[in-house]
Amino acid sequence: MAIEIVPVTPGFAAEVGDVDLARLTPEELEAVKQAFWTYAVLVFPGQTLDAEQHLAFAARFGPHETTIAVHRPDADKKLRVRREFADVSNLDPEGRIWKADSRVREFERANRLWHTDSSFKRLPALASFLYARSIPPVGGRTEFADLRAAYDALPEATQRRLEGRVAEHCIAHSRARIGFTAFTEEERKAMPPVPQLLVRTLPQSGRKTLYLASHAGRIVGLPEADGRALIDELIAHATQRQFVYSHRWRAQDLVMWDDRCTMHRAMGYDDLRFPRDVQRATVSDVANSCEQEGVQAVLA
Ligand code: OGA
Ligand code: MN
């Protein structure tokens, strides 16, 4: 049976049916890829995947990332899931709901800000694959913003002004926005600021897109306050409702998104009461965004 692709929004999110991600034929993989480059968020309901199968599907798109949790001061304590996964759940290594004052809970609160995954790495993410093993009865949505459509909607003069601009991304920037500054020396050293293009071109579709995240802190060549104001203005523009798809999770949904041209954010739920076991596999892009387009970038 041919896989079925049903748009959820006209050009941004689609549901994919009649497919088992644990048993993809080459033709089905090709159809998924084509849909992925056309849309940027794909929802696969009702998937039954163990950790291996989840990782194997992601690996069809690129090399796995390693979670930044390995830099955490408590990383020697066991991680709950393999290091190829970002554990986006509210569970501790023993599988209990985290405590109100836990460091991980505080750190993960930054997922409530609009961001794209791993733009703070020199080699950023290409795509993320989030799989829901259990979900809260209410709340806990994930929202996605289409940065290609947001780019297209900008006035031409603004598009021209942004061309070739480089932003500095650092995980410390997004954490500072939520008042988290308790990085260890080891974490700071492991995750220094990196350059990324503000506007990029997607090789598969030829479309241009903004490349934005709460991890962006300043713009090279602009006074710090002006850069920050521009970033905030662009994030506000790109997250207007017409660019946003809001995903209500079902258990066993796998949702994949293109980190190069989307932002996402976690919505609230009663995280001290309901387990929400969601795990993310993430694959790297082919190169830093500046390098991909031959833009020289030197951070001040
Ligand atoms: C992520 C993320 C949001 C959510 O997995 O990268 O930001 O709703 N998740 O869990
Ligand atoms: Mn994320």
Image (spheres, helix red, strand yellow):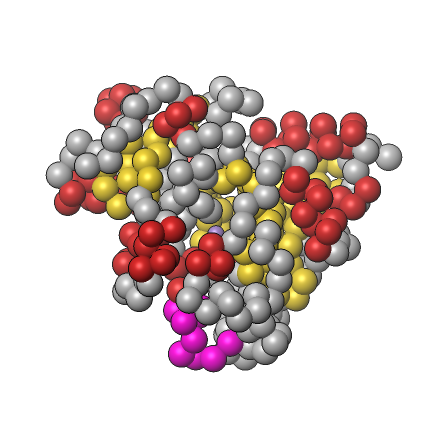
Depth check: give the residue in front, 227 or 2.
227
Which residue corresponds to the image point at 81% horizontal and 33% vertical from the top-left? 25
Q: Position of residue 132 (x, y in %)?
A: 64, 59
Magenta stretch contains residue 95: no
Say which of 247 and 166 sits in front: 166
Which residue is painted at 33% across and 52% down in the image? 189
Where residue 219 sits in the image (x, y, percent)?
23, 37
Residue pictured at 67% horizontal, 36% vertical = 60
Task: Report whether 88 appears left or right of 121.
Answer: right
Relative to 58, residue 93 above or below:
below
Question: What span is colored magenta in the figure?
Answer: 98-106
Q: Is residue 224 left or right of residue 86?
A: left
Q: Is residue 2 visible?
A: yes
Residue 135, located in which quarter of the rendered image? bottom right
> Is there any visible trace of residue 233 in the rendered image?
no
Asked if residue 99 is among those painted magenta in the image, a careful observer would answer yes
Residue 278 % position (x, y): 60, 60
Q: Residue 232, how many percent across, how many down?
A: 26, 45
